[in-house]
Amino acid sequence: MAPKRSPVAPATPVSLKLDGEERARLASLATARKRSSHYLMREAVREYLTREEARQSFRDEAAVAWRDHEATERHATQAELDVWIDSLGTRRPRPAPKWPR
């Protein structure tokens, strides 16, 4: 029995305008890589989306952390964290910084 595949929406065409230099560079790279220009453009979009989604996730997490900090006013300073981190792996590691209440 063949494995089940998740349903994927079919690819749909999209228009992309490139100037002459960009088009020539793309064609040259496609030839060198023995790939089509279409393949390279899809890979570029896929990589861009993956990278930018990760960046947006980081921004979203930072915004949540900031809202939490504003609501609770709990934090540790960089100096406190540095001392704690430097002690990890030693014979007598320090306890993690206490969060002010």
Image (cartoon, rainbow, N blue to C red):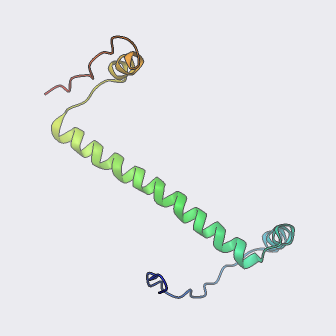
Q: Position of residue 76 (x, y in %)?
A: 28, 26
In the figure, is residue 50 to the left or right of 15? left
- In which quadrant is the C terminus drawn? top left
Residue 78 image-quadrant placement = top left
- Residue 73 versus residue 27: which sits nearer the camera? 27
Q: Does 10 sit above or below residue 70?
A: below
- Above or below 39: residue 91: above
Name the residue furthest left: 101
Q: Is 55 drawn above or below residue 6 in the view shown?
A: above
Q: Residue at x 19, y 33 (%)?
A: 73
- Along the line of sight, which residue is nearer the eye, 17 or 77? 77
Counting every numbered tag in the picture gives 0
Q: Residue 63: x, y in percent? A: 32, 48
Q: Is residue 14 left or right of residue 73?
A: right
Q: Quadrant of residue 83?
A: top left
Q: Quadrant of residue 79?
A: top left
Query: Residue placed at 38% from the left, 20% from the top?
Result: 88
Q: Residue furthest front?
A: 1
- Give me the residue at 76% from left, 76% from top: 37
Residue at 81% in and 71% down: 30
Location of residue 15 in the rendering, given as x and y in whole percent from the top left corner = 64, 84
